[in-house]
Amino acid sequence: MGESWSWRAFFDIVTCASITIKKKIPEQNADHFPPVLRLLEKRQELADADRGLRAQKEVFQATMAALKQRREQLEKKEQELKGSFVRFDKFLQDAEARRSCALRRAAEARHRAGRQEAEALRLRAQLEELQRERARLQRQLERLEPCARLLRQVLEQLPQFQEVPELVARFDALADTQAALRLTERERLRELEEARAQLQRLRDTWQDELLRQGQRRAQLLDRLEAARERTLHWESNWVQIQNTAAQKTLLLGRTRMAALNLFQLVCQHQRQPPALDIEDTEGQLEQVKQFILDLSAVLASLPQAQPAAPAS
């Protein structure tokens, strides 16, 4: 395609040169010049035309060489542009990949930051709750510190107890013993009342039968003797019951005195006046028991507060 265009351009240039030469030569009358002169003129014209054509050919060849060089430069630039387009496209793809990776990493970072922020808020709330709980326990410990001192003093005064649960168990046993003693006392009193009532009934029956039925005197005497024997037996039992009751009463009195002393110690350490009657032993033991249980629960929840060693 480039070669056909070059020949077409060459013929166009030659045609234009011929037309130009013909325009430059003035039209002369053939009759004015002889044939030799016209031949010379024609030869001169041909020589001029040939020189013009050669000059134009040289110009054309130079132009064609320049165009060829220009075309080669343009093709080279076109290849360079194509390579630049390919590299730019690759650069855009790499940039898009890096941008997608950066966006993904940023999204992951935001998500991770959100989780960390939520975890930090949860931990901060938990820390505040633990601090409030610690302050509450500290206040409770300060409030119950006199009770702890009282318990240590009680353990020092009672060397037979090594630990607080032993002391609580001892008080429970004392309370159970007191309840059992009261139940036994009520049963003995009931038996005594039944024996007295039966004895009274027997006496009344004997007196009535003696007055009303003389003919049954012997039978009544036998019954009287039997009643006397039973009376002696019940009186003996009554003496034994009285002795046992005296011992139990003495033990009960000591128990009441011990319970009263403990109750007064508790009231003194709580800085409260005794609100119970001096005879209300069950209430006093219940107050002491509740005090020891509360103090034991506090000491069990605070392992750093070790109980003092009992005095040797």
Image: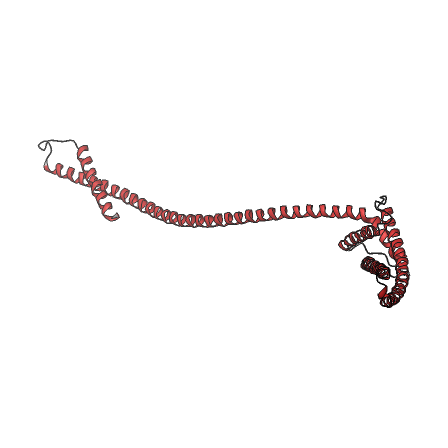
Res. 1 in view? yes
- Asked where in the image residue 20 lies, by quadrant, the reply is top left
Outermost residue, left direction?
31
| Front residue of 68 and 266 | 266
Q: Nearer the viewer, residue 208 or 11?
A: 208
Q: Is residue 56 left or right of residue 172?
A: left
- Which residue occupies the foreground of this view, 246 or 18? 246
Q: Position of residue 69 (x, y in %)?
A: 33, 47
Q: Quadrant of the C terminus?
A: bottom right
Q: Position of residue 40 (x, y in %)?
A: 15, 39
How many numbered marks does the figure carry?
Answer: 0
Give residue 306's position: percent from left, percent from top: 82, 56
Question: Residue at (18%, 40%) from the top-left corner?
Answer: 46
Q: Quadrant of residue 226?
A: bottom right
Outermost residue on the front side: it is 215
Judge whether 213 appears above or below 110 on screen: below
Residue 255 at what x, y percent from top left? Answer: 87, 56
Q: Residue at x 13, y 39 (%)?
A: 39
Q: Is residue 22 above or below residue 80?
A: above
Q: Which colour assignment does the render follow? A: secondary structure
Q: Please indicate, yes or no, whether residue 170 appears anywhere in the rendered image.
A: no
Frontmost residue, 238 versus 179? 238
Find residue 296 and report its image quarter: bottom right
